[in-house]
Image (cartoon, rainbow, N blue to C red):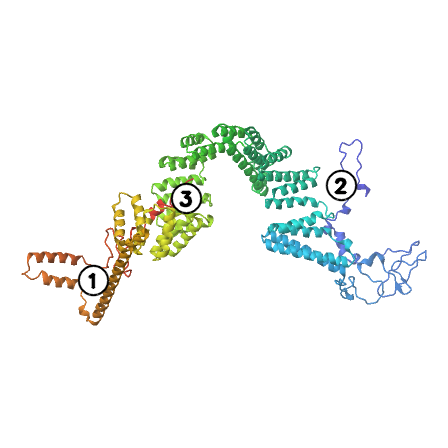
Amino acid sequence: MMEHVHLAAEDEDDLYSGYNDYNPTFDTEDLENDVGFQQAVKTSHGRRPPMTAKIPGSAIARPMGTGFGARMGLVSSLGRPMTAAVQDGVARPMTAVLAAGYSSAVIRGSAFDPLGQSKGPAPPLEAKNEDTPEEKIKQLEKKVNQLIEDSCIAHSNGDLQLSLEKAKEAGRKERFLVRQREQTASADHINLDLTYSVLFNLANRYADNEMFAEALNTYQVIVKNKMFSNAGRLKVNMANIYFKQRNFPKAIKFYRMALDQISNAHRDMRFHRIKIMQNIGVVFVKMGQYSDAITSFEHIMSESPNIKTGFNLILCYFAIGDRDKMKKAFQKLICVPLGIDEDDKYIPPNDDPQTNLVIEAIKNDQLRQMERERKALAEKYIMTSAKLIAPAIETSFAAGFDWCVEMVKTSMYVELANDLEINKAITYLRQKDFNQAVETLKMFEKKDSRVKSAAATNLSFLYFLEKEYGQAERYADLAMNADRYNPAALINKGNSVFVNGDYEKAGEFYKEALRNDSSCTEALYNLGLTYKKLKRLEEALDCFLKLHAILRNSAQVMFQLTSLYESLEDPNQAIEWLMQLISVAPTDPQALAKLGELYDNEGDKSQAFQYYYESFRYFPSNIEVIEWLGAYYIDTQFCEKAIQYFERAALIQPTQVKWQLMVASCYRRSGLRFLVRLCTDMRLKEVQEYATKLKKVEKMKEIREQRVRSGRDGSARGHREGSASSVFSPESIHSFLLEQMGDSGHSSRGTSAKAERMNAKLRSLPGANEPYEASSNKDIDASYVDPLGPQIERPKTAAKKQMDEDDFADEELGDDLLPQ
């Protein structure tokens, strides 16, 4: 073997030569090709032990025992029996092969059973005795832990009642467990961790179900028990409950007690202290003690600054009106580190595909989403703070915005400077200073694409409000060119096309806006209006139903659904949606009037009167409502009540003569009844005389009506008894009168003229196959009352006419396009 060992000489240059040499004896990878090894495996050499065993101390070979003869006991020179030798008729086991399953008994013809399978299966494991007290206690502990886990799972699923029930049951079983341990004299082994978990979970579940008294009592049990370490920190939870109960002094007391329980030695403990001090500052703000709140917030900003505390500090300085400190607090706010990576980290290089794959995988993972949320929250607080303090820190809000913009440009929030400029323009717009707003927005025409698109979108909106549709469309195109995926720009472009009457093209822009942002409610609303203009009512209905699923309490959406169902001739659904609309906007006079109109069309006069009267109460200047109410009182024989409505109409439209005529007609219709009422109110002595005359007139009218009815009944019986030939058509009457008046040559000129007039009247009558029209197109006197009573349907007044759908929707609640 030494021939394979290579010793390095002192004069050799390569000191490490020879390390790659190896002994082929130890090479087992090429055994399949080794002829000698394969021959040994195939022959009996590999199955027999070597014949080399000798007796120690001699050169005589020891014969091997076989299965054909008894083994002979060989004694060594020391007198000790050899391994596997037979002594006293019993073979001694071979120690080297005992683990392989060989037996020490020498039985001729016995089968080879190294695994001991002939002995049968192993005996079963001994069953655990569950009747022992200790085993029962362990099983009970498992049940308690399972109940706590079930309570937490139910809470995570939002089932607060079930979580509380599980927590209570866990508390009952834990108390039973403690009693069991006391009875078995094993009270020293009580599981304090389990007791703490049960009580803590129960207190939290009480607090979640707003059972604050029970929660406080449970927390008090934990806090007062000295065996629970660090239980004093739970006073934070108790303070939170007092805060929810608006018991602010006690909340501050318990927050400070919890603060005393937390040391400032460790970093994690300092984090908890900061959180508690932040809660104390918020409570002071709720109490209006801004100076104490400022003390807490300033301490936090000096120890561990964060965005939320900086924002609260600015609010407190704004509340006390300290300009200088507002500026300093804003500067501290924009310098707060966010602790997030730069966006450049997620830009993949072009030369390393492996790195590109890694960056693509982490570009939108949960950590990246958390970083985006943190940055968005910081930008929101900074923007809100700037808009709040800009009018207060300088003599004008424009100067305040300029100062905030300069401060932001020197911070890591440089991109917010443009957003602040746009907010400055919006502030001008709110102050009705359109010129300054337009000038401010026009400064962004040469900025980058995002800012340019936002500014052009606002300019398009401003011009659209001023009805300069050409300029609105131009800036909408500019916004689209800068950012084609801006849904607000697409909506403004669609609005500009819509007002020009090209509804198909407008619908395409609204659809594109929805493809870019499926939650854009303005695009969905305008698309529904577009379908409505195109008379595609079913598609418009789908749009507004989807919109109602998003905006559950939008009165405009409900009104559009009402209008669509009315156009689809489904009055029941229209009434249902109007009822929902009134539940959201109960004082909307137009919705109430529309509901009254729908009930009037359905023939329900009492419901129609109720909603028309409510509409008049909220808006007493609607001529159509006034006219309907006046006509209703005339129909119900309360002419004196109708007078006040027609007089109001005369005040609203003094040039309309018909209102004065309606008032006069009401006075004429009132007659003796109105005179009796006036005399009664004025306590005149003539009241008895007028009352007697009124009774006589009413009696005469009743007798006359009875005669008319009896005459009609007799005429009907005569017609039924007569033959069918006695029924005269208008044509037969016309021929008969012509024969009597016009065909004889002996009639005079006067008679001929009279015949011509009669002929003209008869020609004006409808034919046998023509429908009868209740009235002509002329205005109908609402004071007219049919003497036959309410059997014949009266013509509808102007208040009952069908309103044009498009005009009604455009002029009233909701067909205005929703611009951006």
* Element type at mark 1: loop
Q: Are marks 3 and 2 in contact (CB under 8 Å)?
A: no
Q: Establish if 446 lies above or below 198.
A: above
Name the disc covering residue 510, or none.
3
Q: Is residue 566 visible?
A: no
Q: Is residue 226 left or right of residue 204?
A: right
Image quadrant for the N terminus?
Answer: top right
Query: Whole-percent x and y of residue 45?
Result: 80, 57
Relative placement, left or right, of 533 versus 74 is left
Where is residue 228? Give x, y as percent. 72, 48
Give residue 21's mark.
Answer: 2
Mark 3 surroundings within 10 Å by alpha-carbon count, few (fewer than 14), some (14 through 19), many (20 or more): many
- Where, by quadrant of the figure, is residue 477 drawn? top left
**Distance CA(mark 1)–CA(mark 3):** 55 Å
Q: Earlier in the sequence, mark 1 or mark 2?
A: 2
Precedes in sequence: disc 3 or disc 2: 2
Q: Mark 1 or mark 2, which is nearer to you? A: 1
Residue 713: give x, y in percent of width and height: 24, 68
Nearer the camera: disc 1 or disc 3: 1
Three-letter amino acid code at disc 3?
Tyr
Residue at the outermost front position:
685
Q: Which residue is tagged 1?
A: 768
